Image (tube, rainbow, N blue to C red):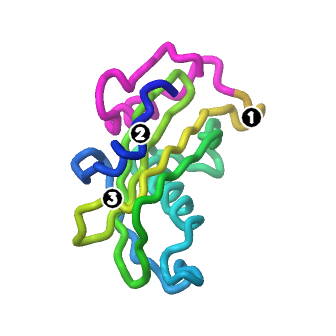
Amino acid sequence: MGNKASPAELKTRKREDYRFFLDYRTRWNDNDMYDHMNNSVYNFLFDSIINAYLIENCGLHPPTAPQFGMCVHTHTDYFSSIAYPAVAELALRVNKLGKSSVTYETALFEKGKEEVKAVGEFIQVYVDRDTNRPLKDGMASTLREKLQELAVDNDAIKAKAKL
């Protein structure tokens, strides 16, 4: 993963470091016995912002699409908590775009506060629905173009990456 940011670098992330946003009103049920949002909920939310972008901007219909992004890796760094009834601001960007893979970086901020609460990494490999194998010719060009809009720099776009 070579260029992966350190937790100290991730902790300094700001909203302007991201390209797509989604608000989420926390629910009472999101809190755990420690009176803050349970760690597993962060991952649900990170999955939600990725799928919201894919559905709303890339025309992806997950149940019927001939190709779909299979999650092969997730990781979250937690910096501080958020709890009901706060509004979470989810943020998304692409750190690396391969032939059939994409590495997303997700973040969670609390509305009205500057510091990032958590930063996640989410890697998908686009596979053929029938075989569950990576696509020989890579992901669809229309999908790639829309994912490029989330890329933070041109170095993130690697058309000849292994996956």
Would you place residue 137 above or below residue 126 in this image? Answer: above
Q: Which residue is mark 1?
A: 132
SS at mark 2 in the image: loop
Q: Which residue is mark 3?
A: 116
SS at mark 3 in the image: strand
Residue 24 — which label? none
Residue type at mark 1: give it.
Asn
Among numbered discs 2 and 3, the one appearing first in the sequence: 2
Q: Residues within 10 Å of mark 2 (few under 14, many from 20)?
A: few
Frontmost of labels 3 and 1 is 3
Q: Which residue is mark 2?
A: 6
Residue 118's spot in the image, x, y percent? 42, 58
Residue 88's spot in the image, x, y percent? 37, 69
Among numbered discs 1 and 2, the one appearing first in the sequence: 2
Left or right relative to 32: residue 27: left
Distance (Cα) linking label 3 and label 1: 35 Å
Residue type at mark 2: give it.
Ser
Q: Residue, x 61% and y 41% (percent of image)?
A: 73
Residue 119's spot in the image, x, y percent? 42, 52
Q: Residues within 10 Å of mark 1 (few under 14, many from 20)?
A: some
Query: Which region of the structure is painted magenta?
Result: 134-163
Return the residue nearer the eye: 116 or 24. 116
The C terminus appears in which quarter of the rendering?
A: top right
Distance (Cα) linking label 2 and label 3: 14 Å
